Image: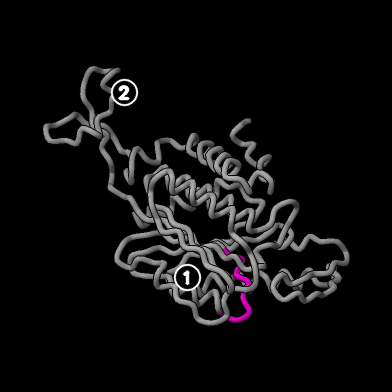
Amino acid sequence: MAKQDYQDLLKPEVINTVEGLSLISRIVVEGFTAGLNRSASVGPGMEFSQYRGYEPGDDLRLLDWKMLARSGRYYIKQSEIDSQVTIKFIVDTSASMLHKETELSKIDFVRVLVATLAYLAHRQGDAVGLFALNEKDAVSIYPKADKKHYNRLLLELIKLSNTGKWPATHISNKSIPNRGRKELIFFLTDMYETGEEISKFIKGLKSAKNEVVVLQIMGAAEMDFNYGANITFEDWETGARIKVDTQQAKTEYLNALENRLKSIKEELLSNGIDHHVFRMDAPLGEALQLFLKQRKRIG
């Protein structure tokens, strides 16, 4: 299968297996990194810069044996910076993330997105952790960097269960950020909140040493309001239903959505938090580019 054909695998029956999720993430990342001008990483937390001659006292693990075979001389892979960081993914597992367009729900798309970003982080040698939350359940997989841990993360992604709302009462997020170390936190959500419960949680994640990035997941129809002439919408979290004449409602909806997204972005930016709307029909390579950009800022 060609690398660009990962979209053919974006089906629930493939996504909801460890093998399928692993295959998708590997195809996406390898296709993406193949187009880079240089390796994103040559070892745990190290960005490759250039070669230099071996000097007594150098770490022998950094010897490039292929260069030795070709040239008969000893060369060291010199790195720009030791940039190993901790990557944490927080997933909103409230019921609204079950919103589906075509075959995929938002939570299925998030499974693919997290698995792909985690695979790239794993290749960088970074430690990766997973947290998920709704009003009835919480998942905490603390960061590690080994292969077995990545496979466990995939399994936990598949097992995530969406139910209820985001907790309306104050919840402690003190155990998620490690305020003494540099880390990159991605929060994946639809930002569906009845008050400010999600916004307050996000702002509580920020510290002087970390970067917090909100990926707001939106469907194409949700963004463009491309629905049939008349449609009944149902709230996943409350069960409320409303019938809408889409032709009359479209302009008002799009204006309200634009204002809402602008408000979220401005509020989070004022707290030093990045906010990006990520459409479910967008190429996954865009998320990988964002990941590398954010990682470079903290690394």
What kind of residue is marked 1?
Leu
Residue drawn at x 60%, y 57% is 278
Q: Nearer the viewer, mark 1 or mark 2?
A: 2
Kindly state the secondary structure of the residue where label 2 is placed: helix
Protein image colouring:
one colour
How many other residues sit within 10 Å of disc 1, few (<14), some (14-19) or many (≥20)? few
User: Is 113 left or right of 130, judged from the image as shown?
Assistant: right
Residue drawn at x 47%, y 63% is 140
Label 2: which residue? Answer: 66
Q: Residue furthest right?
A: 229
What kind of residue is marked 2?
Lys
CA distance for labels 1 and 2 = 46 Å
Label 1: which residue? Answer: 269
Which stretch is magenta?
Answer: 189-196
Residue 271 can be seen, yes or no: no
Residue drawn at x 58%, y 72% is 136
User: Is 70 left or right of 285, judged from the image as shown?
Assistant: left
Kindly state the secondary structure of the residue where label 1 is placed: helix
Residue drawn at x 75%, y 52% is 102
Please identify the dominant SS of the magenta region: loop
Q: Position of residue 246 (x, y in %)?
A: 83, 68
Q: Vertical placement of 200 versus 51: above or below?
A: below
Task: For the residues labelled 1 and 2, say whether their Cβ atoms are less than 8 Å apart.
Answer: no
Q: Position of residue 47 (x, y in %)?
A: 33, 42
Q: Position of residue 185 (x, y in %)?
A: 44, 61
**Would you say residue 13 sits in the magenta stretch?**
no
Residue 231: assigned label: none
Which quadrant of the structure image shows residue 251?
bottom right
Q: Vertical placement of 154 versus 268: above or below?
A: above
Q: Vertical placement of 237 versus 188: above or below?
A: below
Q: Vertical placement of 153 versus 91: above or below?
A: above
Q: Earlier in the sequence, mark 1 or mark 2?
A: 2
